[in-house]
Amino acid sequence: MTSLHGPILLAGCGDLGVGLGARLAEDGVEVWGLRRQVQSLPSFLQGWAADLTQPETLVHPPAPFTTVVYTATPERGSGGSGYQAAYVEGVRHLLEALPSIQRFVLVSSTSVYVQTQGEEVTEDSPTRPSHKTGQAILEGERLVFELGKAACVVRFGGIYGPRRTGLMEQVLQGQAVCYDGAVRYTNRIHRDDCVRMLHHILYLPQPAPIYIGVDSGPAPRNEVLRWLAKQLHVAPPVTRPASEAPESRRQRSNKRCQNHRIVKTGFVFQYPTYKDGYRAIIAAQKEEEEDT
């Protein structure tokens, strides 16, 4: 492991950025969070009020940043234009504003992989997304890779955790549906392991250019839904023919992402499978209910 020298910039500082910032602050590192509104940032983060899509707001960096962790995400419901703004315009503008960057860690997505037959996917698997969102993410990666050895891209799977319980809510409300047909794999990672992985990567002296950020248990979606229903003590999801699945779901990729590269660096998952992570969430919710 290497030592970190601040100041470090967390660009687009939302849930993951704040979580990472807390860990870095505990390490004694000077940490800044960039977002349009900084009033709500916790006290351990210094705020840089700027808009990644407006380059004129980035011309006067408040500190000599040499390390950036870019966690900006599109505005909800913004579609392809939102991804273009977050992953292409934002990345380009920040790189232009900070020409002395020595390490740039970009939070990306496994959605750039579009395999459809349940194949095992590694960092070296082909990325040829046909959708505009995936294309925008790949373009953002390309911009970062132009930095050479300073670049590191982390492609996270589906992130779940506290305040990220959409799948659980679907099951609880009876809205989840299992579709017959071929097994369709899903890949996920607990929010806390995302933060821990980014923290771990920052301390690697020579990180790889790409890491896949998923847990160790890719699992069929139907299996996950039925297991959640059992844990939540509700009726199992209804089962319908695959032909009734929405077109958007039928077009989704179907792959088993592998995390061997990050594991080989010594990273240990707190929640190695979805069962470990969801059990912790359910237990915490139950404890909170008992305390109220």
Image (cartoon, rainbow, N blue to C red):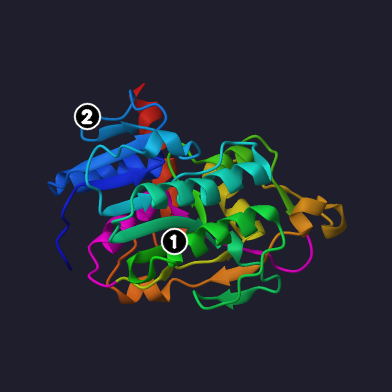
Residue drawn at 49 percent across, 67 percent down: 217
Q: Is residue 130 above or below residue 46?
A: below
Spot occupied by residue 6 in the image (x, y as percentages of width and height): 18, 50
Residue at horizontal 44%, vertical 42%? Answer: 282
The relative height of residue 99 versus residue 21 in the rendered view (above or below) is below
Residue at the right extreme? 243
Q: Quadrant of the N terminus?
A: bottom left
- Would residue 174 be found to the left or right of residue 282 on screen? right
Q: Is residue 233 visible?
A: no
Q: Position of residue 209 (x, y in %)?
A: 40, 71
**Residue 130, label in figure:** none
Q: Quadrant of residue 101?
A: bottom left
What's drawn in magenta, residue-wise? 179-206
Mark identifier at residue 43:
2
Q: Which residue is mark 1?
A: 144
Whether the magenta-drawn stretch holds residue 1 is answered as no
